[in-house]
C-alpha cells in the first residue's frame, strides 16, 4: 500500500476512536464545551487528512458531520441523542469504509448510496444542505430552456418531459465547459462527470471543427458536456465547487422541456453559438508554468500589501514581509533591493510591482484546485520525521522482536546444557564453571532485553475497555434499562496479547450483567434502588498479574435457584443440592452447560455461557471467580498474568518423557518413601504436614506405560489448581526454564491436555501440560 | 535554483497531511522537519533555523495564528517566510494570518506543484540587503 494511505488509515483509527469516545462522553455530560471541542477537532483533523485522497463520499460525509459538530460547538444547537445516533452511525459507516479501503484501496461501491441518507440526516438540524456562498452555482429556475438542450437527444427529452409532467418531479440540467487549460490545474472533467450522483443522461459537445493533427494540442481540453441528473443542488454544487465558474445549472420542469421541444418558447439563442464552444487552440497558454509563477508571485505581493495595510508591528515581521517582496520581485524578473524596510517604502514598491506586471490571463492564484489524487510514485519517502517523539511501530515488528528474544532465551538455555556436557562428558569442571559465568552474563542481558521488549508490548487496559461505553449505551437502550458505566484503572498496563484475549470474555461478562444482572427501571424502583443501574469495570495491577473486576448493582445470583437448576440439569447430586454452600452454588454457573436465564435473549448469545469465559481466561493462564449477593449485585473477578509471552515452566519427566508445567501452579516438590503412600477410597493419597493430598498417577492419565521402582522414593509434584492441592506422581524432577509457549496448532489444537509447546536449549520440544485438563483426565482414568 | 539545502518545517496536527507536505517538499529538495502543533513548531524553531514554515491553522495546544505570532515575536524572531494553509475559508481568516505574520494564506486543497512552486519562490529571493 502506498505509505501515505497507510499513514492515513493508522491516523484515522485513532481519530475515529476519539470521536466515538467523545460523543459518548457528551451524552453523559451534555454540552461540555471542552468535549465538544475535542470531538470537533478530531473530526476536523480527520477531514483534513481525508481530503488528500480521492474518496469523495468520505469527504462529503465527514464534511456533513463536521458542519453539524461545528454548529454544536458554536452553541447554535444542543446535541441531542438523535444527532449523536446519526453522528455515531456516520463514523461507523466511515470505519466500515476504511476497512474496505485497507483491503482494496478504494471505497465500497455502495458508499455513495449509503452516505446520501446519512448526509441528509446530519444536515437536517442545521437547515438542510449547506450551500457555501462563495461556491454556490447559480441555479436558474427558468421558464425557457437554454439552447444547449439541443445536445440531448430529442427522443429522450420527450420521454423525460412526459415523465416530469406526470410526476411533477424536477430534473437538473447542467452544462459543463471545462477550461481548455484545466489539465494543468489537476482538474479531471471526466472524473468529475463520473461522480455526478443520479446521472440520467450525458451528452458531449464537440468542437465545431477538430484541428488538424499537426495543430492538435493534446494538453488542451476541447470538449464540453451537458448532462441531466436528479442529484440535489447541493451535491452538484459540492462536486463542482472548484470549477463553479465552468458550469451552468438549470432546473427544468416537464412543461418547459415540452415547450422547448415544440419550439413554442424560443431558446436563448437559435442554435448553439460559437461562443458556446469550449476552448479552441489559440486560447491555450503557450507555457503553463510561466503564468502560474507570475500568478503566485502576485499572490505573495498582494498578501504583502495586505500585511502592510494591517501595519506589521514587529521588526521581524516587517523583515519577513520585505523578504517575501524581494523573493516575489526576483521571480517576476524585476529584482528590487530593500535596505531598511519601512511600511511606506515597501507599500510603494509592492504597488509598483503589481502595476508593472499585469495578471496572467487566467488568474491561477484565485482558482481553487481539485483534491489531489494520491500520487503513488511520489510518496515513497516520508522524509525526516523529527517533530514527533512517539514512534508508531507495526505490531508485527514487535512480535518478531519478541520471537527473537524467545530464540535468544532458547540459545541461552543451550549454554547450561553445554556446561553440563563439559563437566559430565569431558570431565572439565573449570570449563563448566566458565561456561556458567558466560551464561549468567548473557542471562542478565537477555532478561533486560526481554523486559524492554515486553514493555513495548504493554498496552493500557483502556484499549480493552474502550468499546464498552458504546456497547453499554446501545444495549441499554435496546433493553430499556438505565445504566451508568464506570471505568476505573484504565491506565493499568498489560501485555497486548492479554489485552486482546481479554476482549471476548469481557464483552460476555458485561453483556451478562446488562442482560441478566441489571433489572428494569421499574423493578429497581420497586426494590428501593435508584433507577439507574451501575456497571463498573475496574482494573488494578497486582504484582505479576492484572485483576479486572466487572461488577453490577443488579439483582445478583440466587443460590437457591442456581442449585435447583444445576440439579435439574444433572450437574449436581441430590446430596449436593442440600449441602452446597451459597458461594459454591454461585460457582456452579461456570459449569459447562449451565444457563440460568429463563429466556435466552439475543444479547448474551446462546449456548456459550460462563464456562466459555472461564475456559478462555484459564487459557490465558488466569483465573475467574464470582461473588454475588442476592438483591445487591454481582462481581466477577478476572485475574490474568501481566504477560503471557514468556512462561516459566518446571520440567519433569514421566515414563522417560519430559513435560513442563507452569511454575506458578507448582506448590512444592516432595519425595516420599513408597511406604508412606496410602490409599483412601480407591484414591492414592499422601499425608503432608497433616493434610491429606490426593496423588494422581500422571503416567496412567497420559496413557504412558510406566511402573515406579518400588525401592525408590516417589517423586510427587504438588500443584494448586482451583484452590485445591493435588499431587502428581512423576518419574523425576528437572530444572525450571523460561520458555516462549507456542500454542498447539492444526490437528494438535484439539489436544486439550497440552497448553502448548516450547523449544528447549538442547533442541527438545517440551510439551507443556494444561493442568486442569490433565486432572480431569486423571479423574476419569481413576 | 539554489543549491544549498533549505530547511522547512511542516506544522499540521493531521499526520497524513504532515507526511504529504513533507514528502512534497522533501522531493523538491527541502530538508523537512515536522511538528504536530504550534507549540512543537515553536520548540523546533528555537532549536533550528528554518528557511520556510508551512503552517496549518486549526491545531490543538497552540493554533496556527498564535504559532506564527510567536515565530515573529522576540521569543523566536525568525523572518523566514511562512505559508499558512487552512481548510477554512471564512472572511477575515486571511487577514488574521497576515496580522499574525504569515506571508501567504492558502485554502486547501493546494495543488502539489503550486505548494512546491511557492516554497521555492519564497526561499529563493535575495532577502533584505541590510
Image: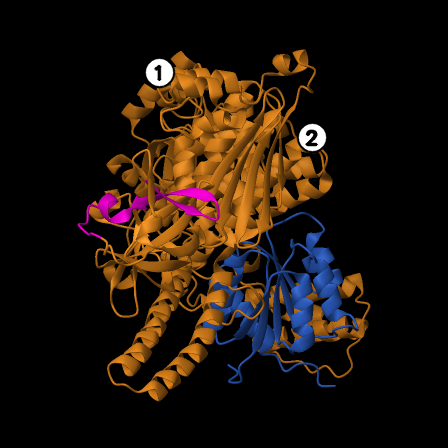
Chain colours: A orange, B blue
Task: Name the spot of residue A758 as percent of width and height, x first.
Answer: 31, 59
Instruction: Determine contact: label 1, label 2, CB under 8 Å.
Output: no
User: Which residue does the numbered mark 1 point to in the structure image?
Assistant: A162
Q: Which one is nearer the viewer's eye here, A53 or A203?
A: A53
Task: Name the spot of residue B81 as percent of width and height, x first.
Answer: 65, 71
**Residue found at the far left of this picture:** A705
Whether A598 is drawn above or below A307: the answer is above
Q: Is residue B25 magenta?
A: no
The N terminus of chain A sits in image quarter: bottom left
Task: Name the spot of residue B86 as percent of width and height, x first.
Answer: 61, 54
The image quadrant of residue A171 is top left
Q: Residue at x 64, y 78 (%)?
A: B48
Q: Residue at x 57, y 27 (%)?
A: A628
- Classify 10 Å Cα crowding around label 2: few (below 14), some (14-19), many (20 and above): some
Q: Residue at x 65, y 67 (%)?
A: B41
Residue A47 visible to the viewer: no
Please give the label number shown on residue A436. none
The image quadrant of residue A539 is top right
**Residue found at the far front of this picture:** A675
- Identify the secondary structure beneath mark 2: loop
User: Which residue does the numbered mark 2 point to in the structure image?
Assistant: A77
Mark 1 against mark 2, which lies toward the viewer?
2
Q: Please report, as a chain letter, where disc 2 is located.
A: A
Give the magenta part as a residue range: A684-707
Q: Which one is nearer the viewer's eye here, B88 or B129?
A: B88
- Identify the secondary structure beneath mark 1: helix
Instruction: State left or right for residue A515 relative to residue A686.
Output: right
Count of numbered labels shown in the rendering: 2
Q: Earlier in the sequence, mark 1 or mark 2?
A: 2
Amino acid at each position: 500500500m502506498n505509505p501515505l494511505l497507510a499513514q492515513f488509515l493508522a491516523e484515522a483509527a485513532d481519530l475515529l476512536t476519539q470521536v466515538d469516545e467523545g460523543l459518548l462522553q457528551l451524552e453523559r455530560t451534555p454540552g461540555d464545551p471542552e468535549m465538544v471541542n475535542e470531538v470537533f477537532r478530531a473530526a476536523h483533523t480527520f477531514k483534513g487528512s481525508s481530503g488528500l485522497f480521492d474518496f469523495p463520499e468520505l469527504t462529503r460525509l465527514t464534511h456533513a458531520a463536521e458542519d453539524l459538530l461545528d454548529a454544536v460547538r458554536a452553541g447554535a444547537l444542543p446535541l441531542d441523542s438523535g444527532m449523536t445516533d446519526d453522528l455515531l452511525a456516520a463514523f461507523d459507516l466511515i470505519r466500515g469504509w476504511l476497512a474496505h479501503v485497507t483491503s482494496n484501496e478504494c471505497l465500497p461501491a455502495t458508499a455513495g448510496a449509503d452516505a446520501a441518507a446519512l448526509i441528509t440526516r446530519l444536515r437536517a438540524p442545521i437547515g438542510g444542505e449547506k450551500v457555501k456562498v462563495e461556491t454556490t452555482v447559480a441555479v436558474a429556475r427558468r421558464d425557457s430552456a437554454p439552447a444547449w438542450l439541443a445536445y440531448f437527444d430529442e427522443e429522450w427529452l420527450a420521454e423525460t418531459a412526459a415523465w416530469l409532467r406526470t410526476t411533477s418531479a424536477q430534473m437538473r440540467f447542467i452544462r459543463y465547459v471545462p477550461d481548455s487549460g484545466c489539465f494543468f490545474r489537476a482538474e479531471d472533467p471526466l472524473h468529475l462527470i463520473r461522480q455526478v450522483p443520479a446521472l440520467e443522461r450525458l451528452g458531449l459537445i464537440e468542437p465545431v471543427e477538430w484541428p488538424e493533427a499537426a495543430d492538435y494540442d493534446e494538453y488542451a481540453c476541447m470538449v464540453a458536456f451537458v448532462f441531466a441528473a436528479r442529484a440535489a443542488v447541493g451535491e452538484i454544487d459540492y462536486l463542482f465547487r472548484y470549477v463553479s465558474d465552468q458550469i451552468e445549472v438549470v432546473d427544468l420542469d416537464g412543461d418547459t422541456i415540452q415547450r422547448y421541444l415544440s419550439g413554442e418558447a424560443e431558446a436563448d439563442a437559435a442554435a448553439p453559438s460559437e461562443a458556446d464552444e469550449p476552448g479552441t487552440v489559440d486560447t491555450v497558454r503557450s507555457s503553463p508554468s510561466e503564468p502560474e509563477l507570475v500568478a503566485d508571485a502576485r499572490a505573495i505581493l498582494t498578501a504583502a500589501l495586505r500585511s502592510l495595510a494591517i501595519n506589521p508591528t514587529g521588526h521581524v515581521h516587517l523583515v519577513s514581509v520585505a523578504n517575501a517582496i524581494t523573493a516575489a520581485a526576483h521571480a517576476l524578473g524585476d529584482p528590487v533591493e530593500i535596505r531598511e524596510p519601512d511600511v511606506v517604502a515597501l507599500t510603494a514598491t509592492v504597488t509598483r510591482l503589481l502595476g508593472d506586471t499585469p495578471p496572467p490571463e487566467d488568474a491561477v492564484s484565485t482558482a481553487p484546485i481539485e483534491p489531489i489524487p494520491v500520487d503513488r510514485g511520489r510518496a515513497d519517502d516520508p522524509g525526516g520525521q523529527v517533530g514527533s517523539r512517539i514512534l508508531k511501530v507495526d505490531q508485527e515488528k514487535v512480535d518478531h522482536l519478541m520471537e527473537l528474544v524467545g530464540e535468544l532465551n532458547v540459545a541461552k538455555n543451550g549454554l547450561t546444557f553445554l556446561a553440563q556436557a563439559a563437566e559430565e562428558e569431558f570431565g572439565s569442571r573449570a570449563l563448566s564453571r566458565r561456561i556458567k559465568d558466560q551464561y549468567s552474563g548473557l542471562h542478565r542481558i537477555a532478561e533486560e532485553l526481554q523486559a524492554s521488549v515486553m514493555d513495548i508490548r504493554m498496552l493500557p487496559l483502556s484499549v480493552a475497555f474502550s468499546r464498552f461505553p458504546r456497547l453499554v449505551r446501545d444495549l441499554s437502550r435496546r433493553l430499556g434499562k438505565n445504566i451508568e458505566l464506570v471505568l476505573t484503572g484504565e491506565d493499568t498496563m498489560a501485555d497486548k496479547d492479554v489485552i486482546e484475549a481479554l476482549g471476548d470474555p469481557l464483552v460476555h461478562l458485561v453483556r451478562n450483567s446488562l442482560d441478566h444482572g441489571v433489572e428494569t427501571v421499574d423493578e429497581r424502583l420497586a426494590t428501593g434502588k435508584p433507577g439507574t443501574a451501575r456497571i463498573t469495570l475496574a482494573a488494578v495491577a497486582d504484582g505479576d498479574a492484572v485483576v479486572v473486576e466487572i461488577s453490577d448493582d443488579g439483582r445478583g445470583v440466587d443460590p437457591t435457584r442456581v442449585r435447583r437448576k444445576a440439579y435439574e440439569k444433572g450437574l449436581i447430586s441430590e446430596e449436593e443440592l442440600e449441602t452446597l454452600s451459597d458461594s459454591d452454588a454461585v460457582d456452579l454457573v461456570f459449569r459447562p452447560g449451565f444457563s440460568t436465564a429463563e429466556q435466552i435473549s439475543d444479547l448474551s448469545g446462546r449456548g456459550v455461557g460462563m464456562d466459555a469465559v472461564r475456559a478462555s481466561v484459564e487459557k490465558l493462564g488466569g483465573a475467574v471467580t464470582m461473588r454475588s449477593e442476592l438483591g445487591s449485585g454481582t462481581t466477577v473477578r478476572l485475574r490474568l498474568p501481566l504477560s503471557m509471552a514468556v512462561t516459566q515452566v518446571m520440567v519433569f519427566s514421566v515414563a522417560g518423557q519430559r513435560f513442563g508445567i507452569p511454575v506458578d501452579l507448582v506448590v512444592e516438590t516432595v519425595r516420599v518413601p513408597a511406604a508412606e503412600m496410602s490409599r483412601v477410597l480407591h484414591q492414592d493419597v499422601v499425608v503432608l504436614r497433616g493434610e491429606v493430598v490426593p496423588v494422581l498417577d500422571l503416567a496412567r492419565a497420559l496413557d504412558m506405560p510406566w511402573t515406579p521402582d518400588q525401592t525408590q522414593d516417589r517423586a510427587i509434584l504438588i500443584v494448586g489448581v482451583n484452590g485445591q492441592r493435588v499431587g502428581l506422581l512423576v518419574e523425576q524432577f528437572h530444572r525450571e526454564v523460561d520458555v516462549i509457549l507456542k500454542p498447539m496448532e492444526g490437528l494438535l489444537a484439539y489436544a486439550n491436555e497440552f497448553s502448548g509447546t516450547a523449544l528447549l536449549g538442547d533442541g527438545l520440544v517440551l510439551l507443556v501440560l494444561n493442568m486442569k485438563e490433565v486432572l480431569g483426565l486423571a479423574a476419569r482414568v481413576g | 535554483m539554489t543549491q544549498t539545502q533549505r530547511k522547512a518545517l511542516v506544522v499540521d496536527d493531521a499526520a497524513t497531511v504532515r507526511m504529504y507536505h513533507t514528502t512534497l517538499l522533501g522531493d523538491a529538495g527541502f530538508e523537512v522537519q515536522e511538528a504536530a502543533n504550534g507549540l512543537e513548531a515553536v520548540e523546533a524553531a528555537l532549536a533550528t533555523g528554518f528557511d520556510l514554515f508551512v503552517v496549518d491553522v486549526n491545531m490543538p495546544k497552540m493554533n496556527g495564528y498564535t504559532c506564527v505570532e510567536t515565530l515573529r515575536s522576540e521569543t523566536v524572531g525568525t523572518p523566514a517566510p511562512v505559508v499558512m494553509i487552512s481548510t477554512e475559508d471564512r472572511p477575515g481568516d486571511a487577514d488574521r494570518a497576515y496580522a499574525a505574520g504569515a506571508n501567504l494564506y492558502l485554502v486547501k486543497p493546494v495543488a502539489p506543484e503550486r505548494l512546491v512552486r511557492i516554497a521555492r519562490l519564497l526561499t529563493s529571493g535575495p532577502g533584505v540587503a541590510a
